[in-house]
């Protein structure tokens, strides 16, 4: 059997026992042959049980009382039908009382306010006995033959008195008994003992003393209230409704016992009248006394609540102030200290702060305080132990219970866990920070049950907010500290020289390599240390004429104002002709505050390799040009043979004119002019050949690309005739000027023309047109393409043909188009090849205009 079931069963047995004892006490306080008793405790026992337990379990305790009722009342020689009817009336009274108190009252098991006591008196003391007595009197009259109104009156008065005196006493004892004994001071306990002894002594002497009451004393008061009132007021004023009800119960028992034994101040009245008088006397005394005690208790609680509120607000102010300027590393110890202060202030047994795991299903203790001798809180609580509570916390709702069994039906697992942990009352508040629930703040009572008024819950929410904000700040500081450490580690590990700038260009952070880099001679940013404006350092260097400083200044400014996504600059430190080479990179910081990261990388080795590769490419390009000229030997011989043959013929003719008598000088002069023209033609061919075969550094100058194409066309014109190729130039007269190296661009065009003529060499006697076109691009650049009528490119080779050593010719090296691509890309252009719609292939390349070249 599970623990809750054991607890319910034990409570049911206790209810049955109390009912049985109460029934026997009621029989003792009965005046036979009358059926009703002067006080009938079983009904009050049932009422108290129903007020103390949740309604879903009322039927269990009513059923448990039934066997006790049968055992107690069947021994009175009453008919079974009467016994059953009396049980129905007893249960109806308890149900009416419990329902009325719960419906109209704020706390069914509390008598600490005038409203609650008034509701209890109206519902449980008056209404429930009043209504249930009609059925009870009818049953007794029908089955026993007793007068109806006498039975009704006797039962109503006796049950009202019993509800009035016994129910508050039972509820007070169950809810506060053990806790009050443990928590009360020695002086308070001694006062309670003295009051109980004095009240019992005066009651016994007054109602059942050997002197037949204090009325035997000359001049003594006639009514016993005069002697009891001080003690009853003492109980009500000092110990509240609970103390007043216990005092009234003791007084009632003594008085009724004395009356039933014909003793005390009521001995001069007939027995029936003395009992009614005693009941009315006790009822009249009890009602105002309970109301007075509740009013005093309420006033005292209001004053105590005000005092606690002021104390709590003072505590909260100190708590908030303690964490305002507290550094992150001291927050943990401060929270531990304040948890202890809160626990002692609130009179709790345990306060814990738990943090959710990453998946939000486990709670781990991060801070805790436990009052001795309680056991420490479990370090980890998994979500399956408290599913309902975890769900409430994720919904940012508190978990509040005066007893675990007050939790709703869908929290069975939670109730079991709280019971196993020994927690009798609890308040668990969500801790929210950064828009998420990252933990909980839990207040637990272990020694005794306690209530959690809404006002207290709201106050403790403020405490949870203070702790949550402090922990969130600590978490943020730890994350920032970790980020700073990571940033420092990353900066230190970089081989580059790195500086971080804010949006104004001031240096926020640098690595060690930056410090060493800034000390190199000729560095324009040598003065740009932490907190110094890097822009101003570059600006000062530009004013002093330091190379590249002005260009770097403009690039950094463009990145900082987000007009450029990145800026890259390669430069020689110390100016042209110096060494080493560095690459400067400026990228923006991706954060709302803006800023940028500047890095300098030593690229001397890469630059040396690039220069070596460039020289190798130039040597290879020169070799290719020489090889190409070897292929054009016949064409060049034909180009040179024409002017040389003309010179020879003109020289022979001039000799004949000179040998004539007289010599024809006019003809000789014309012949000399022709010789000069032929010589110029030959010189132009040789000069073009020398320019094409020139070896040296690249010269970037403005060029008319149409003129470059015409010069190359003249070089291959004879070869085209030999190959039976028709070379056509379709040149755009509005083609823009480009910046480039004449020889390198001539080599590109020559390679494309030679490739086109060779591709058409397999066409036999067919027409072999080769067309060179130029046009202006949309970006104001130049677009050149060479179209042949050959077999075209095989599928998938459009990119491969530009790779080094890839060739489709049996005797080819595979370097012509690769060199052409490297030359065009070095000129910031692009080159590609496609097949023509009909036949043949077209090779295209573009070059940017002067305004489109990168700086």
Image (cartoon, helix red, strand yellow):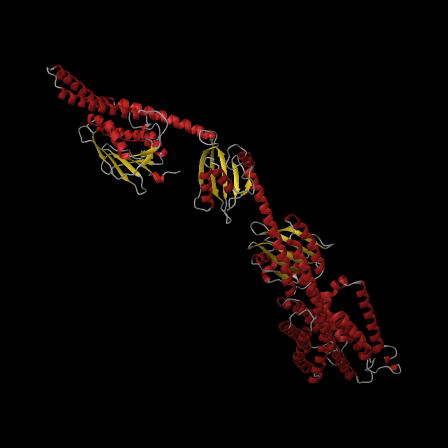
Residue 482: x percent and y percent? Answer: 58, 44
15 shown above or below 634 = below
Residue 632: x percent and y percent? Answer: 25, 24
Residue 540: x percent and y percent? Answer: 50, 39
Nearest to the observer: residue 96 or residue 508: 508
Q: Is residue 632 left or right of residue 56?
A: left
Q: Is residue 496 left or right of residue 613?
A: right
Nearest to the observer: residue 216 or residue 476: 476
Residue drawn 80% across and 85% down? 269
Placement of the C terminus among the 4 image quadrants: top left
Q: Residue furthest left?
A: 661
The image quarter in which residue 294 lies: bottom right
Residue 842: x percent and y percent? Answer: 27, 35
Q: Is residue 634 left or right of residue 205?
A: left
Residue drawn 64% across and 68% down? 58
> Does the image show residue 69?
yes
């Amino acid at each position: 059997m599970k623990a809750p079931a054991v607890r319910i069963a034990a409570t049911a047995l206790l209810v049955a026992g109390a009912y049985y004892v109460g029934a026997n006490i009621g029989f003792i306080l009965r005046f036979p042959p009358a059926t009703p008793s002067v006080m009938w405790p079983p009904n009050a026992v049932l009422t108290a049980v129903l007020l103390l337990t949740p309604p879903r379990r009322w039927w269990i305790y009513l059923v448990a009382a039934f066997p006790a009722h049968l055992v107690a009342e069947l021994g009175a020689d009453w008919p079974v039908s009467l016994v059953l009817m009396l049980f129905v009336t007893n249960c109806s009274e308890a149900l009416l009382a419990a329902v009325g108190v719960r419906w109209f009252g704020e706390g069914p098991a509390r008598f600490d306010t005038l409203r609650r006591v008034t509701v209890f008196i109206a519902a449980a003391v008056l209404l429930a006995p009043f209504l249930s007595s009609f059925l009870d009197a009818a049953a007794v009259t029908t089955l026993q033959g007793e007068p109806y109104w006498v039975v009704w009156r006797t039962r109503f008065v006796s049950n009202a008195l019993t509800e009035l005196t016994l129910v508050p006493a039972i509820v007070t004892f169950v809810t506060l008994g053990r806790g009050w004994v443990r928590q009360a001071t020695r002086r308070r306990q001694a006062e309670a003992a003295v009051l109980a002894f004095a009240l019992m002594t005066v009651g016994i002497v007054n109602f059942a003393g050997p002197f037949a009451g204090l009325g035997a004393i000359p001049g003594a008061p006639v009514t016993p209230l005069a002697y009891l009132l001080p003690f009853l007021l003492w109980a009500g004023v000092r110990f509240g409704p609970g103390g007043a009800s216990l005092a009234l119960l003791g007084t009632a028992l003594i008085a009724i016992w004395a009356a039933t034994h014909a003793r005390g101040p009521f001995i001069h009245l007939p027995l029936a009248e003395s009992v009614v008088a005693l009941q009315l006397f006790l009822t009249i005394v009890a009602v105002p006394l309970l109301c007075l005690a509740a009013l005093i208790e309420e006033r005292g609680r209001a004053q105590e609540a005000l005092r606690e509120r002021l104390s709590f607000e003072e505590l909260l102010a100190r708590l908030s102030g303690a964490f305002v300027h507290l550094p992150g590393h001291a927050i943990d110890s401060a929270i531990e200290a304040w948890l202890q202060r809160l626990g002692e202030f609130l009179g709790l047994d345990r306060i814990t702060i738990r943090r959710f795991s990453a998946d939000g299903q486990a709670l781990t203790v991060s801070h805790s305080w436990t009052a001795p001798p309680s056991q420490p809180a479990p370090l980890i609580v998994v979500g399956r132990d408290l599913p309902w509570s975890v769900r409430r916390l994720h919904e940012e709702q508190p978990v509040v219970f005066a007893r675990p069994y007050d939790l709703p039906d869908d929290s069975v697992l939670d109730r079991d866990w709280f019971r196993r942990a020994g927690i009798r009352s609890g308040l668990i508040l969500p801790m929210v920070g950064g828009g998420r629930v990252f933990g909980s703040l839990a207040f637990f009572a272990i020694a005794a049950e306690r209530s959690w008024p809404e006002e207290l819950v709201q106050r403790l929410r403020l405490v949870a907010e203070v702790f949550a904000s402090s922990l969130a700040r600590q978490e943020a500081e730890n994350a920032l500290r970790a980020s700073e450490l990571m940033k420092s580690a990353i900066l230190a590990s970089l081989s580059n020289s790195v500086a971080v700038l804010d949006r104004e260009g001031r240096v926020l952070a640098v690595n060690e390599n930056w410090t060493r880099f800034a000390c190199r001679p000729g560095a324009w940013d040598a003065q740009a240390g932490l907190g110094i404006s890097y822009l101003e350092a570059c600006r000062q260097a530009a004013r002093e004429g330091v190379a590249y400083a002005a260009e770097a200044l403009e690039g950094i400014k463009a990145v900082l104002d987000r007009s450029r996504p990145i800026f890259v600059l390669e430069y020689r430190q110390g100016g042209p002709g110096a060494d080493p080479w560095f690459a400067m990179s400026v990228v923006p910081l991706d954060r709302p505050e803006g800023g940028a990261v500047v890095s300098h990388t030593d690229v001397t080795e890469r630059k040396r390799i690039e220069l070596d590769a460039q020289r190798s490419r130039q040597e290879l390009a020169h070799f290719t040009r020489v090889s190409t000229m070897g292929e054009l030997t016949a064409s060049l011989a034909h180009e040179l043979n024409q002017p040389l043959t003309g010179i020879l013929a003109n020289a022979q003719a001039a000799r004949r004119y000179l040998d004539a008598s007289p010599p024809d000088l006019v003809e000789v002069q014309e012949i000399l002019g022709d010789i000069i023209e032929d010589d110029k033609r030959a010189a132009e061919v040789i000069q073009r050949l020398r320019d094409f075969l020139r070896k040296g550094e690249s010269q970037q100058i403005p060029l008319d690309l149409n003129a470059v194409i015409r010069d190359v066309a003249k070089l291959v014109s004879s070869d085209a005739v030999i190959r039976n190729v028709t070379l056509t130039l379709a040149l755009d007269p509005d083609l823009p000027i480009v910046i480039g190296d004449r020889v390198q661009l001539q080599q590109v065009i020559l390679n494309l023309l030679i490739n086109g003529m060779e591709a058409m060499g397999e066409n036999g006697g067919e027409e072999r047109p080769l067309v060179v076109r130029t046009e202006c691009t949309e970006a104001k650049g130049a677009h050149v393409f060479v179209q042949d009528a050959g077999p075209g490119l095989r599928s998938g080779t459009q990119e491969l043909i530009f790779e080094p050593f890839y060739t489709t010719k049996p005797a080819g090296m595979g370097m012509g188009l690769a060199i052409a691509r490297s030359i065009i890309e070095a000129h910031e252009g692009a080159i590609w090849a496609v097949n023509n719609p009909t036949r043949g292939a077209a090779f295209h390349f573009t070059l940017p205009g002067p305004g489109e070249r990168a700086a």
